[in-house]
Amino acid sequence: MAEKEKYTKYEKARIIGARALQIAAGAPVLIQTDKIDPIEIAIEEFEKGVIPITVKREE
């Protein structure tokens, strides 16, 4: 992500939830971490900006 995008709290929750579900289903983790819980891993990935999920908005 070139510049930090601003997400609403709903978009953030949806992105983290979707990513946590992927991790729980066996998707590879995109960062080095000692965490085991998929939600905690997804939050850490979100904060580092490495989650490959985008949000489409009507403008």
Image (spheres, rainbow, N blue to C red):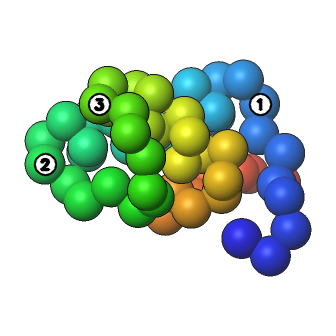
Residue 20 position in % (x across, y down): 35, 35
Residue 12 position in % (x across, y down): 63, 33
Secondary structure at badge 2 equals loop
The answer to the question of whether label 1 and label 2 lie on touching residues, with beta carbons closer than 8 A, is no
Disc 3 and disc 1: Cα gap in Å?
26 Å
**Residue that mark 3 sits on:** 36
Q: Nearer the viewer, residue 36 or 43?
A: 36
Q: Residues within 10 Å of mark 2 (few under 14, many from 20)?
A: few
Residue name at image x 13 percent, y 41 percent: 25
Quarter in which the C terminus is drawn: bottom right
Secondary structure at badge 1 equals loop
Disc 1 and disc 2: Cα gap in Å?
27 Å
Left/right of residue 23 with respect to residue 15 in the rendered view: left
**Residue that mark 2 sits on:** 26
Tell me the amino acid under the disc marked 1: Thr
Displayed quadrant of residue 38: top left
Tell me the amino acid under the disc marked 2: Gly
Task: Specify which label sits upstream in the sequence, 1 or 2.
Answer: 1
Left/right of residue 23 with respect to residue 48 in the rendered view: left
The answer to whether residue 29 of the structure is visible from this angle is yes
Q: Which mark is residue 23?
A: none
Q: Nearer the viewer, residue 2 or 7?
A: 2
